[in-house]
Amino acid sequence: MKACNRYELDGEILEIPLRWDQRTQAYVEDYGDYIDQPAYTPAGRPILLTIEDACPHADMGDSPGGIDCGACRHYHQFPGSQLGVCSNEKRRRPGKQRGAAGTRKEEPI
Ligand code: SF4
């Protein structure tokens, strides 16, 4: 079985592969597939890395100089991951229903 972290987002299971990082001497998530091919929850919400460039619909609130999704009020990052979901209705893919937040489940390495 390939090592991965498993997240449940709005009813969709996402499996993020893990790779060994020599510098930190720990397993880290490999986001390659999510950078090349962004995913959406079944509710149509984009699943993004915290370091994605902020879009024109960002709400930086108390961090007006924020430049990435991680600083936006619409972004909900999952503990222990650099992934999160954007809850901004303007970024939701049309034709989908509203959904709930996600949870994380770890697979044994
Ligand atoms: S979290 Fe959503 S609204 Fe905020 S900058 Fe990222 S894509 Fe835009």
Image: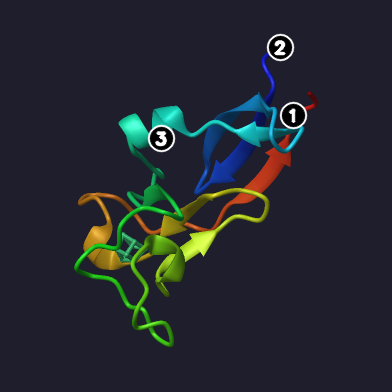
Residue type, mark 2 in image? Met
Q: Assess disc 3: are there few (<14), some (14-19) or many (≥20) residues with their C-alpha within 10 Å of its C-alpha.
A: some
Residue type, mark 3 in image? Tyr
- What is the spatial separation of the Cα atoms under label 1 and label 3, in whole angstroms? 19 Å
Q: Assess disc 2: are there few (<14), some (14-19) or many (≥20) residues with their C-alpha within 10 Å of its C-alpha.
A: few
Instruction: Tell me which label, 1 or 3, sits earlier in the chain.
Output: 3
The residue sitting at the right extreme is: 108
Element type at mark 2? loop
Give the vertical position of 5 relative to 51 (above or below). above
Give the vertical position of 61 relative to 30 (above or below). below
Instruction: Tell me which label, 2 or 3, sits earlier in the chain.
Output: 2
- What is the spatial separation of the Cα atoms under label 1 and label 2, in whole angstroms? 9 Å
State yes or no: discs 2 and 3 in contact (Cβ < 8 Å): no
On residue 1, the disc is 2
Query: Residue 43 at what x, y percent from top left?
Result: 37, 50
Closer-to-camera residue (91/35): 35
Element type at mark 3? helix
Which residue is under mark 3? 34
Which residue is under mark 1? 107
Q: Assess disc 1: are there few (<14), some (14-19) or many (≥20) residues with their C-alpha within 10 Å of its C-alpha.
A: some
- The residue located at (51%, 58%) in the rendering is 100
